[in-house]
Amino acid sequence: MHRIAIVGGGTGGTVLANRLASELQSEIEAGDVEVRLITADPNHVYKPTFLYVPFGKKTVDDAKRPIEELVDRRVTLTIDEVTDVNTDRNRLSLADRTTRLHYDQLVLATGATLEPEAVPGLAEGGHHFYGPDGAERLRDELADFTEGHLVLSVVGVPHMCPAAPVEFPLMVDDWLRERGRREDVEITYTYPINRAHGLESVADWATDLFEERDISLETFFNVDEVDPDANVIETVEGDDLEYDLLVAIPPHRGSDLVIDAGLGDDGWVDVDRHTLEATAAEDVYAIGDVADVPTSKAGSVAHYEAGVVADRIASRARGETPTATYDGKTVCFLEAGMDEATFIEFTYGEEPYVREPSTPIHWAKLGYNESYWLTARGLL
Amino acid sequence: MTDTDDPDVTIDSKDASCPGPLMDLIGKVKTLDTGTVVELQTTARNSTTDVPEWLEEAGHELLEIEERDEYWSIYLEVN
């Protein structure tokens, strides 16, 4: 029996399990191959939904579905937490303390974790839309926010969904205008480096739009701490910024599992950027946010990486030499307001071209959010 | 021997795409004492302009940028 273990039931892990169930259908049915998906959360969560929750356009329940409804019946689903990865013995330990699972090929798809507490005062003083609780709290806060200074601050880099920090101020600008509140709300966007975004073309695009929409831009703005009583952000560069409503992109971290297994010092797995194989151990791959590759931490990346790793793993399971490689393909929609959007597409080292925003692309983004569940099933 | 021959801290950001090296530096500098000499190794050409710009903004001192065979070493002192 050739055992394939996938840890993590987000976009990467779920797409991969379903792709493997399809590619190795006859081997699984013959009992020669097992594809096991191990995830602590019985629900699959589609995180891009959370961006729409503060604006009342989606609910947190829209973001989740039971994972057992999404995975192919040929996949062995284990709902439990992996507590240890032993790459010398090709073995996983589970939180139930009794189960140890052996693997021939392992894929880590454990994602990224929010860590607002890494910046003093941020958890108390800031809001975010990167998880269900944060998105709901921000929705309630925004509903009552009629005047003052709204600051969108990118505190942590790297972070999930590279487009979201730029989308939020453009959406909130539009949302406030529709409600006649915009004249009483000042909006500021801050970013750690000397432009509005890591990707130069997105930075240029956003800078022009911010100017058009009267959104202030602060660059070289690295948050050192937040004073939640005084409503002041203090930066590493020695600046202070007062706020009435702080929406932060919190710091992210990888997985302790990765650090403990010696697969990456900072919780992200060191991988070959093309094969996605771990550099520190044999028979181990990483996909999605936890893989340290020079592109964005985005659902599309996890999706495309899953396709490549499915091909490589299936080849090896059949005794063939794997040839599929990942070229860094990334696709991101960018909302430019409440009813217009654009999108970017790029590979490693490539600067994307930002098209003029349009209503049909906004509809396409909303349509994709609905059809995402087909992506999770490995169909789209 | 100058400070840059023997930095106190070396940050290896080779192969990280922009703005990774600058973010690696900012994250590390926050934890360092005044007077610490840091070498930032980067393969991203933009770092050779972005990093000095940030150092000036944040009040740290650029000591030297050295072009090596396959990467740049940017030396700085934390103020």
Image: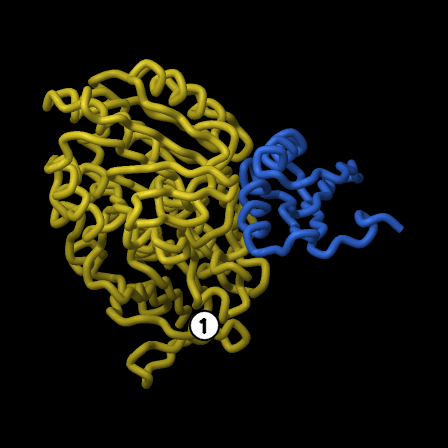
The correct choice, above or below, for A176 with respect to B1 in the image is above
Q: Which residue is drawn at 68% across and 45% down?
A: B40
At numbered mark 1, what does the secondary structure look like: helix, strand or loop? strand
* A139 on left or right of A307: left
Crowd tier of the residue under label 1, counting other residues whose Cα lies within 10 Å: few below 14, some 14–19, many 20 or above:
many
Q: How is the image coloured?
A: by chain
In the rendered structure, the answer to whether residue A68 lies left or right of residue A5 reads left
Tell me residue A320's x, y (percent): 51, 55
- Please tell me which residue lies in front, A339 or A114: A114
The quadrant of the image that shows the C terminus of chain A is top left
User: Which chain has been coloured yellow in this picture?
Assistant: A
The residue sitting at 44% across, 51% down in the picture is A309
Instruction: Mark yes or no: residue B65 visible.
Output: yes
**Chain letter of the residue beneath label 1 in the structure image:** A
* Image hue for chain B: blue
Residue farthest toward the front in the current orientation of the protein: A230
Where in the figure is residue A221, as x and y percent of width and height? 46, 37
Q: In this view, does A183 lie above or below A241?
A: above
Eyeballing the image, is B14 above or below A100? above
The residue lying furthest to the bottom in this view is: A98
Residue A209 position in % (x across, y down): 34, 18
Front residue of A160 and B75: B75
Residue type at mark 1: give it.
Answer: Val
Q: Name the residue under label 1.
A: A85
Residue at (39, 55) in percent of width and height? A120
